[in-house]
Amino acid sequence: MKNSEKMPESKDNQDIINVEEYTKIGKKPPKGKKYLIRVEDKSYLFDKGSASGAEILEKAGHTPVDCYSLYQKFKGCDFEKISPNEKVDFTKPGIERFIVKPPEVFHYTIDGEPETTDEEYLTPNQILERGGITPVSDYYVVQITQDQQQIEYKDSPNKPIKMECPGLKFISVYRSSTPVA
C-alpha cells in the first residue's frame, strides 16, 4: 500500500469507522464497532453497521421523520432517496454523506377529512376545491393552529398559504347566514 493510500485512523482507538473517509480513498468500510456518518454538515456516530432512514433522521434531530426526506450521496453519483423504513448499510462502498430536504408531499385536513398535496403553497380556494367544497364563493377557510388559534381567510381567498409539516388543519365556513323561517 502506498503512503498516499493510508487507511483512515480510528478516532481514540475505539474502532470508529469514518464512512466518508473510506469513500474518499476508494476503499470499502470494514466491519467495525462504530460508524461515523455525515448528515448535512454534522457527523453522527452509530453503534452498528446499519440504520434505517428514520433512525438517521432522528439522530440528526429531524423529527417528526415524516416531515423530512433523506437522501444518500454516493461518490460520483446523484442522490438516492432513502425511505424511513429502508435500511442503510454503512459498510456499502461509496457512501459520501446524507442530506435532508423538506417533504415531497404535505398532508392536511379540511373539515376533518385528510388531503395531500405536492405543492408548497395552496390558496384557501384551492383547499376548498380539493376538499370537494363547492361553490368556493359560498365558503371561506379558517386555519386551526397547533395551539388552537384560528386564522380566518374570509377576505383573502387567493392568498397563498405555506403548507407545513406536520399537516395543517382547516375548516370550511359557510359565508351566508341561513334564513330562519
Image (spheres, rainbow, N blue to C red):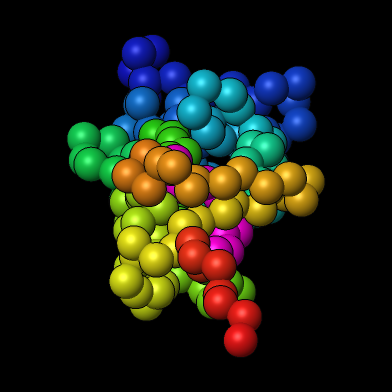
Asked whether the viewer can see residue 145, the reply is: yes
* Magenta-drawn stretch contains 165: yes
Task: Name the foreground residue: 41 vs 163.
Answer: 163
Q: Residue at x 49, y 65 (%)?
A: 176
Q: Residue 132: x and y, percent?
A: 37, 77
Q: Quadrant of residue 43?
A: top right
Is 63 on the left or on the right of 129, as rendered?
right
Where 165 sits versus 73, above or below? below
Q: Residue 7: x and y, percent?
A: 48, 25
Task: Name the foreground residue: 119 vs 32.
Answer: 119
Q: Residue at x 73, y 45 (%)?
A: 149
Task: Name the foreground residue: 122 vs 140.
Answer: 140
Residue extending furthest top?
Answer: 3
Where 109 sits versus 8, above or below? below
Q: Residue at x 56, y 75 (%)?
A: 178
Q: Quadrant of residue 76?
A: top left
Q: Residue at x 23, y 41 (%)?
A: 78
* Magenta-drawn stretch contains 92: no
